[in-house]
Amino acid sequence: MGESTFVNQTRAQTRPAQAARAVKNRRQGVDWILIAVTIALTLFGLVMVYSAGPKVAQLGNNPDDYYLKRQLLWAVISFIAAGILSYIPYRLYIRLTVPMMFVTLLSLVAVVILADTTFNANRSLLSGSIRPSELAKLVTIIYVSVWLYSKLDVLNDMSFGLVPLMLILGLTGGLILVQPDISAAITVIVLGGILFFLADGEWRQIGLVLAFTVLIGWIVVNIYPTGMSRIMNYISGLRDPMQASYHVKRSLEAVINGGLFGVGIGHGSTKFTGLPVAHTDSIFAVIAEETGLIGSAIVIAAYLVILWRGLSIASNAPDKLGSLLASGITVWITMEALLNIAVMVNLLPHAGNALPFISYGGSNLLITLSGIGILLNISRSSGEKDSYKGGGPFGAVVDLRWRDRRRRVSRFGRTPGAR
């Protein structure tokens, strides 16, 4: 009796301690740096949308703060979605990934059938309010991550690994390409290739993925007149900036006007004198003009911080699925940002990517912050693990692929333990 009572008392005493440790572990897993940078970029985006939006709003007979109010509403909805997703266990996506992909493909088909045309392309639903290609990027990352995680043991078998992966990406990218949304289609395919690499795909098969991507790009450039004109304008702009496309010339004008410190937020002139889509794709040009080189550098640094924190979360994830999800989401967000910035200064051909967290667009903001919510859940799941493990972003990428030193898939003529 006495011994039983002692055991029960001991158990009763350990329960509060275990609960306290669990709460502490969850708090340790919250990446406050990632949260702070995300909030800062989103709030800065609201300011820049308010600065860049009045001219476009006036053209539509709307008040000057029209786009600010809409973006603010989407920001509130997006932060709520991110908060909810940060508490949903990421392993739940193993069961949800097929329905999610089905709904995404259905919405992409609906875009083509309903033909809701904006900017000479069928990319949205409900008069431009919903853009399924944005959803497709995040859902593709989730679907491919779960699929690769389930196929790790047979990944380097062509019939079970690369071929099905290319079919998945080809179907999704093809439906996006029909709209046409060339940049989104290429983004989906590139993200699939990166995830295949991080899942320990063989270099030979990775080379085939790259060749497939180049082939798709070549076909797109030759089929769509827009693609060819963008390439030619890009090449001309490299030779002589005065021969670049009108869009790039106005963007470079804004960058030059901004100088080192900028002309001040709200005081830029290029957004009023012909800079195309100043509040969406060209918003970085407005940032460069109004905050100067220093402000632009701070924005770029913020995206690099997201890259650092996201890859650190990936390298500390509890399992390979968490690593793939976190790395895919992180690379997607930073790739979109760097593509948008590079296009504005003619380092890359015009692609039409939005600047994450900053460009006007409810679908883009909602999906991007949802990705951050999933990242935060993976971070929380890491528990007591050191959130700063892995050093810089490059070290984290290397660690993602080879950190566990697990043996490669056995091949014909090799012993299971052979490397």
Image (spheres, grey):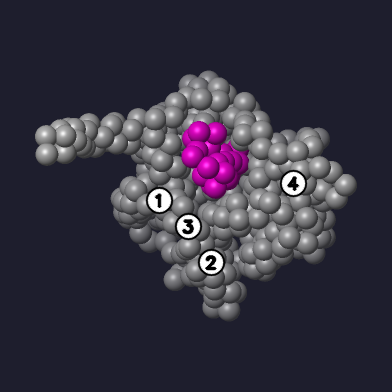
- Say which quarter of the image contains residue 194: top right
Alpha carbon of mark 2 to alpha carbon of mark 4: how far? Answer: 26 Å
Q: Which mark is residue 226?
A: none
State which quarter of the image contains the C terminus.
top right
Most extreme residue toward the bottom is 113
SS category of the residue bearing label 4: loop
Q: Disc 4 marks which residue? A: 409
User: Which circle, 4 or 3, is nearer the viewer?
Assistant: 4
Question: Which amino acid type corresponds to the residue marked 2 in the rendered image?
Answer: Val
Q: Disc 1 marks which residue? A: 89
Earlier in the chain: of badge 2 and badge 3, it is: 3
Residue 374 percent coordinates (x, y): 44, 47
Q: Determine crowd level at label 3: few under 14, some 14-19, many 20+ residues with C-alpha closer than 10 A.
A: some
SS category of the residue bearing label 1: loop
- Name the residue nearer the viewer: 245 or 97: 97
Residue 394 percent coordinates (x, y): 63, 28
Q: Disc 3 marks which residue? A: 93
- Say which quarter of the image contains residue 403: top right
State which quarter of the image contains the N terminus.
top left
